[in-house]
Image (tube, helix red, strand yellow):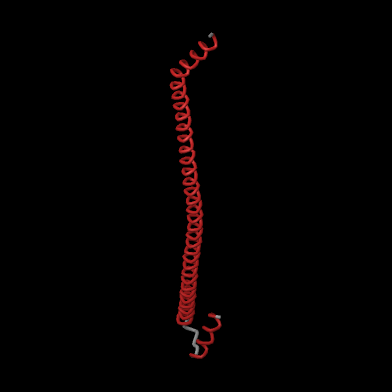
Amino acid sequence: PRTINFLIFVAILYYFVATPFKNFYKNRIVKISSKLDEIQKKLLESKAKKLDMMKKLEEAKASATAALVTAKKEAEILVQNIKKETQDELDLLQKHFEEQKDYEFRKMEKELVSNTLNEIFSDPNMTLKQSEIIELMMKKVS
């Protein structure tokens, strides 16, 4: 009889307790599963964000490289422009120098001719022919 009573007790206990235990474990399994799903979802989102950031990083690197190349080209163009402008200025200064030199040379010739003529005409004792005057001037000029 004790065994039968014990079996009946276990059966009644199983009848009342089994369903709540099953529900408890099912709920626990569902919660764990949902948390696992959330974690996997977050993991996938973080991987997607990582890939997106890697793409942005590559784009930024490409953009930086392109900007660097553009800056180098602009610097080369600026250097060439500065060289050209400097060369143009040097050519212009050389031209002005040559013009000034020619002007000073002509001025010096005129002064020399003028001084020579003044000497010739101021001295009353001196009587020279035209060929002698020209010869004298040529000697002074050269």
Residue extending farthest to the front is: 1
Q: Is residue 59 above or below residue 132?
A: above
Quarter of the picture containing the C terminus is: bottom right
Task: Please report the residue visible at 46 percent of the width from the left and 38 percent of the height from the top.
Answer: 41
Task: Please report the residue visible at 47 percent of the width from the left and 64 percent of the height from the top.
Answer: 81
Task: Please report the residue visible at 49 percent of the width from the left and 79 percent of the height from the top.
Answer: 116
Residue extending farthest to the top is: 2
Camera-side residue: 47 or 91? 47
Q: Is residue 60 above or below residue 20?
A: below
Q: Is residue 19 above or below residue 78?
A: above
**Percent x, y of residue 48:** 47, 44
**Percent x, y of residue 101:** 49, 72
Camera-side residue: 49 or 84? 49
**Percent x, y of residue 128:** 50, 88
> How many marks can you see?
0
**Percent x, y of residue 88:** 47, 68
